[in-house]
Image (tube, grey):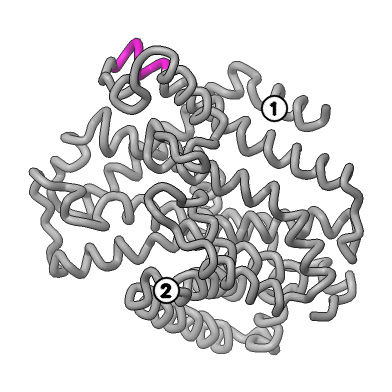
Amino acid sequence: MGKLVDSKYEEGFSKNDTQIVKGIAIIFMLFHHLFRDPKRYTGYIVDCTPFPEPAINWVAASFKICVAMFTFLSAYGITLNYRKLSAEYRFSGKDATRQSTRRLVSLLGGYEFLFWLIILLDLFVIKSGRFVKIYGTGLRSVMNCLIDAAGLAKLVSLPNFLGTYWYMSLAIILIVLMPLLLKLYRSLGGAVVLFGSLLFYVLFPMTRDHQYAFLPNYLFSMVLGMVSADQNLIVLMDQKLCRQNRLFCRILSCSGGVLLVLGFLLLRQKGKDTFLMPICDGLIAFLLCFVVYAGLGRIPVLKKVLEILGKYSMNIFLVHELFRIIWCRDFIYSFQKWWLIFLVLFAVSFAAAVLIELLKKLLRYDRFVNWLRRS
């Protein structure tokens, strides 16, 4: 695939657009974890009115696409950062190490603060007994905890304090792998690398003992995010479909994008555990980014709300399962109405996320992380 001239990157899919998509993804994630399977709320009354319960479960299960959305966005942002070093991605090993290290510091900086805060609270305040239940006892428990703290537990098939923390291993792999993917992309082209990502899914099937942090499932989304960033595909698609920038064209384009998302969701759910799943996940992530850029991100109030939610998405991701399964599970599911249960988990998680950021500022933790990134 050929390269676009730099002038077409002056205005494009921005950091604000990224935050909006993250806001949508975090909503999907909360709904997914609450209702994806009736076993999630066994023993509680969940009123799904006016929808049948299987419909709620199906939608929640399909919202697993939130992972593909995050991997797509991460690869997109990393690609643009490397592009600043070299439009042809001819960066040195030293440059790649520096870029990857800074990204890892940012990722793990937010994770470490919350991880150890949660562990200490659970051990000495809540006293739920989860530490021993998950990590075991003795030296083994210490090693399990430290590996989990490093974000590598899923990669080496060790337990996570919270099941959702498996994503940290995937995020680390993504950061480390991106320089290689960009080099392959430069040498072989986008079509070959996209096909290679699907071949990787076929050649490295996941088992209970070898899950590779689910990389086979999401490598296609990563590569598609990389290609989309390099080719500026979201902006080009918007220019093609909304050439005259008319409201009618934007409504029609966004409606078409949403219909395609629904179609790929149906195909995804039918094609689980086949190569169709990573393809659908990647295309859905791309289409949702397009819908945000073409229209959804232009609605003032909605834009602001989703941007704020995206800003706190990392903290919400790290804390929400504490409330859902450990610290106040009975409280969360006591509201019975499915939409009320969702709103309560959302409110509690968001409030906690905001308080955590305030605590970081009070302790000047962000300054410390920024200092590490510059070092």
SS class of the residue under badge 1? helix
Label 2 neighbour load within 10 Å: few <14, some 14-19, many 20+: few
* Part of the protein shown in magenta: 120-126
Disc 2 to disc 1, how far (Cα)?
Answer: 40 Å
Could you tell me what secondary structure mostly forms the magenta stretch?
helix
Q: Residue at x 77, y 54 (%)?
A: 179
Q: Residue at x 45, y 25 (%)?
A: 144
SS class of the residue under badge 2? loop
- Mark sitting on residue 24: none
Quarter that holds the N terminus:
bottom right
Q: Residue at x 51, y 70 (%)?
A: 202
The residue carrying mark 2 is 274
- In the image, residue 249 above or below residue 43: below
x, y (%) of residue 35?
24, 55
Q: Earlier in the sequence, mark 2 or mark 1?
A: 2
Q: Is residue 327 magenta?
A: no
- Mark sitting on residue 369: 1
Quarter that holds the C terminus:
top right
Residue type indicated by callout 1: Val
x, y (%) of residue 96?
82, 47
